[in-house]
Image (cartoon, rainbow, N blue to C red):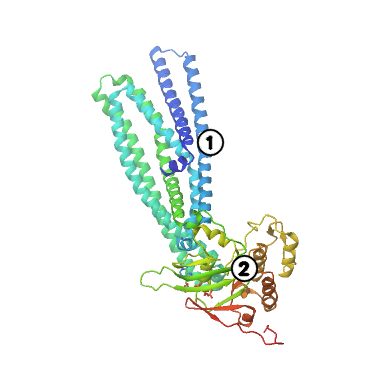
C-alpha cells in the first residue's frame, strides 16, 4: 500500500494512531451489535417490554465512543496525510531544483507536473478512505469473532465463503488496476495535447488547417481516454456487483445451509443473520473504499517513484561537499572539453569540441556562428549546466569538479536566449533602490515599470522589454562574469546600438567579463575577441577595429 508507505515517512506515530482509532471504532461498533442482539433476545425471552437501563447506558457509551473515535481517526488521518504530501511535494521541488539540466530535458515536464499537482490532489482527496477501510476490515473481523462465539459452524462457512469471495474480488481488483494504469497513461497524453494547444494557441488560431488537425488529434486522444475510463468504470462495477452477490450468498448459506447441519442453530439464526446484516455496511464500505483507494494508491506510487527518479536526476554537485573559489579569479581555462547529445538509434549525435580556450578576467568575448552550430551548447558547458564527456575546466588552475560547481556558477549572471523573468528577484534580499532605478533608466524602462522592493512592477511586457529587465536583474546580481545569449536579438535598432556601443563598453569598464552569443555582425568590433562556432568547433577570428573617425554603428 503506497499510501501507507507515504504515511510511514512521518515515522511510526501516524500509523499507530490510525490502527488505534480504527480498532476502537470497530470494537465499539461490534459491541453495539452484541448489545442490540442481547437486548432483543432478553425481550424475546422475558416477553417484557421493560428497558434494561444498564444495557441502554452501555449502548449509548459505545455509540459515543464509536462516533468520537471515527471522527478523530478520519480528521487525524487527513492531517497526517496532508503533512506527508507536503513533505513529498517539497522534496520533489527540492530535487527538481538540483537536477541535472540535460537529464531533466530528457525526462520531460509532464510526469513532474502530474505528480506535483494531480497526484498530490488525488491522494489528498481520497486518503480518509484508508482510515475507513482499516476500520471496516477490523469491524468485519470483530463481527466474525462474534459469529464464531454464537455458532462455530456458521463462522466456518461464512469465513470460507468470504475468503473465496475476497480472493476473487482482489483478482478482479488487479484487472481493474491494470485498466487504471492504462487510463493514467491516456490522461497524461490528454494533458500533453492540452499543453500543446495552450503553447501554440496563436499559431493554431491563424491557420485553420492546423487548428482542425490539432482538434482532430485532440478528439482522438480524448476518445481513447474516454474508452479507457469506461473500461475502468465497467471493471469497477463488475467487481462491486460480484462483491454484493458474494455477500447475498452468505445470507443464503446461513438461512438454507447451516440449519441442515446443526440442530441448535435455530436459537442463534436471528442473531447471526443480524450480525451479517450489521456487517453489510462495513463490507460494502470496504469494497467502495478499495476502489477509491486504488486510484489514491496508484497516485501515491507515482509520487514515490518520481522521488526516486528525481534522485537519479540529481547532479553530483548537489551532494558533493562544497569547495570555495576565489572571486577575484584571473583566468578560466577549458582544456579538451567535449560533449555530445545522446542520439536516437540510427541517428548521428551532435557533438561539440574539443574546446581549448583561455578566458581572461575583464575580457569581452563574442561567440558567433550559424544556427545549430553549437553556441548555446557551448554556453551550457561553460556555465557548468552540461557536464563535458571529456576534458577539464579550471579557474586559476583549480579544477571545477562537483565540489566547486556551485562556487563556479556563483561567478556568473546570465540572460539566456529562452530566459525566464522570475516573479521576484530571488536570491537578492534588498536590491539597492537607487542602483535599480538608475539601471531601469539606463534600459529606458522607467516609464514602463519599476523595481518595487524585490520584484518588478509589471511582467506582461514585450519580448525586448522583458530582456531588458533580465539584464537589469543580471547586473543587480553583481557577478564578475556576465553571460548573454543573443540578448540583442529582440531589441529595436536604437537600443541595439545603445547596447553594443554604450552598455557593453560601460559594463566592461566596470570590470565585468562579458561572454555574449551574437549574430550582430555590425558590432563585432565591440568585442576584445571573437570566437566563431562551426559544426561544434570554435576558432578565433580577428576582430575588426574601426579606423579613426569611423563610427561603429550601421
Ligand atoms: N537538448 C538537446 N538534445 C539533443 N540535441 C540538442 C539539444 N539541444 C540542442 N541540440 C542539438 O545541438 C545542436 C546545436 O544546438 P545549439 O542550441 O547549441 O545551437 P546554436 O548555435 O545555439 O543555434 P541558434 O543560433 O539557432 O540558437 C543542434 O543541432 C540541436 O539539434
Q: Which residue is tagged 1? A: 75
- Percent coordinates x, y for residue 520 in the rendering: 61, 79
Q: Which residue is tagged 2? A: 482
> Is residue 99 visible to the viewer in this orientation of the structure?
no
The residue positioned 40% from the left and 29% from the top of the image is 278
> Is residue 324 visible to the viewer in this orientation of the structure?
yes
Q: Nearer the viewer, residue 412 or 152?
A: 412
Answer left or right for 546 relative to 107.
right
Answer left or right for 235 relative to 132.
left
Label ID, residue 498: none
Residues under numbered marks 1 and 2 in contact, where contact means CB atoms less than 8 Å apart: no
Q: Secondary structure at mark 1?
A: helix
Q: Nearer the viewer, residue 367 or 492?
A: 367
- Percent coordinates x, y for residue 314 in the rendering: 47, 56
Answer left or right for 176 relative to 356.
left
Q: Secondary structure at mark 2?
A: strand
Label 2 crowding class (10 Å Cα cut-off): few <14, some 14-19, many 20+? many
The residue positioned 46% from the left and 29% from the top of the image is 25
The residue positioned 41% from the left and 13% from the top of the image is 47
Quarter occupied by the C terminus: bottom right
- Tell us which disc is closer to us: 1 or 2: 2
- Residue at mark 1 to residue at mark 2: CA–CA distance: 53 Å
Answer left or right for 348 relative to 53.
left
- Percent coordinates x, y for residue 336 in the rendering: 46, 71
- Residue 298's place in the image compared with 40, above or below, is below
- Residue 24's place in the image compared with 93, above or below, is above
Amino acid at each position: 500500500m503506497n499510501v501507507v508507505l507515504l504515511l510511514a515517512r512521518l515515522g511510526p506515530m501516524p500509523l499507530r494512531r490510525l490502527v488505534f482509532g480504527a480498532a476502537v471504532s470497530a470494537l465499539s461498533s461490534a459491541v453495539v451489535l452484541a448489545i442490540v442482539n442481547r437486548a432483543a433476545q432478553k425481550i424475546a425471552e422475558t416477553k417484557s417490554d421493560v428497558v434494561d437501563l444498564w444495557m441502554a447506558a452501555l449502548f449509548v457509551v459505545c455509540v459515543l465512543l464509536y462516533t468520537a473515535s471515527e471522527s478523530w481517526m478520519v480528521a487525524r488521518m487527513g492531517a497526517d496525510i496532508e503533512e506527508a504530501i507536503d513533505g513529498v511535494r517539497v522534496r520533489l521541488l527540492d530535487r527538481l531544483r538540483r537536477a541535472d539540466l540535460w537529464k531533466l530535458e530528457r525526462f520531460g515536464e509532464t510526469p513532474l507536473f502530474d505528480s506535483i499537482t494531480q497526484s498530490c490532489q488525488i491522494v489528498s482527496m481520497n486518503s480518509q478512505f484508508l482510515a475507513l477501510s482499516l476500520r471496516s476490515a477490523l469491524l468485519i473481523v470483530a463481527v466474525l469473532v462474534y459469529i464464531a462465539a454464537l455458532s462455530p459452524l456458521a463462522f466456518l462457512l461464512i469465513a470460507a465463503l468470504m475468503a473465496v469471495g475476497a480472493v476473487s474480488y482482489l483478482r478482479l481488483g488487479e484487472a481493474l488496476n491494470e485498466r487504471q494504469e492504462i487510463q493514467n497513461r491516456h490522461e497524461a497524453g490528454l494533458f500533453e495535447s492540452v499543453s500543446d494547444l495552450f503553447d501554440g494557441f496563436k499559431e493554431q488560431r491563424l491557420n485553420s488547417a492546423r487548428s482542425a488537425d490539432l482538434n482532430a488529434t485532440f478528439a482522438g486522444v480524448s476518445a481513447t481516454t474516454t474508452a479507457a475510463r469506461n473500461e475502468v468504470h465497467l471493471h469497477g462495477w463488475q467487481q462491486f456487483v460480484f462483491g454484493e452477490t458474494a455477500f447475498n450468498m452468505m445470507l443464503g448459506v446461513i438461512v438454507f445451509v447451516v440449519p441442515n447441519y446443526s440442530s441448535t442453530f435455530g436459537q442463534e439464526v436471528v442473531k447471526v443473520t443480524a450480525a451479517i446484516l450489521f456487517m453489510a455496511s462495513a463490507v460494502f464500505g470496504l469494497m467502495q473504499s478499495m476502489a477509491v483507494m486504488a486510484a489514491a494508491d496508484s497516485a501515491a506510487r507515482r509520487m514515490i517513484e518520481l522521488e526516486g527518479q528525481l534522485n537519479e536526476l540529481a547532479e553530483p554537485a548537489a551532494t558533493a561537499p562544497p569547495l570555495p573559489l576565489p572571486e577575484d579569479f584571473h583566468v578560466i581555462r577549458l582544456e579538451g572539453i567535449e560533449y555530445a547529445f545522446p542520439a536516437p538509434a540510427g541517428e548521428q549525435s551532435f557533438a561539440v569540441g574539443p574546446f581549448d580556450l583561455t578566458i581572461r578576467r575583464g575580457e569581452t568575448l563574442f561567440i558567433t556562428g550559424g544556427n545549430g552550430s553549437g553556441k548555446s551548447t557551448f554556453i551550457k558547458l561553460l556555465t557548468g549546466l552540461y557536464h563535458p564527456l571529456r576534458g577539464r575546466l579550471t579557474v586559476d588552475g583549480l579544477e571545477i569538479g562537483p565540489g566547486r560547481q556551485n562556487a563556479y556558477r556563483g561567478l556568473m549572471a546570465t540572460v539566456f536566449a529562452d530566459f525566464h523573468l522570475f516573479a521576484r528577484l530571488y536570491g537578492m534580499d534588498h536590491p539597492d533602490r537607487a542602483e535599480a532605478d538608475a539601471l531601469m533608466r539606463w534600459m529606458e524602462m522607467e516609464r514602463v515599470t519599476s523595481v518595487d522592493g524585490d520584484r518588478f512592477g509589471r511582467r506582461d511586457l514585450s519580448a525586448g522589454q522583458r530582456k531588458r529587465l533580465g539584464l537589469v536583474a543580471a547586473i543587480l546580481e553583481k557577478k564578475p562574469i556576465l553571460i548573454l545569449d543573443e540578448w540583442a536579438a529582440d531589441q529595436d535598432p536604437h537600443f541595439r546600438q545603445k547596447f553594443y556601443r554604450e552598455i557593453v563598453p560601460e559594463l566592461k569598464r566596470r570590470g565585468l567579463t562579458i561572454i555574449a552569443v551574437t549574430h550582430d555582425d555590425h558590432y563585432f568590433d565591440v568585442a576584445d575577441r571573437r570566437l566563431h562556432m562551426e559544426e561544434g568547433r570554435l576558432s578565433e577570428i580577428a576582430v575588426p577595429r574601426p579606423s579613426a573617425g569611423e563610427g561603429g554603428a550601421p
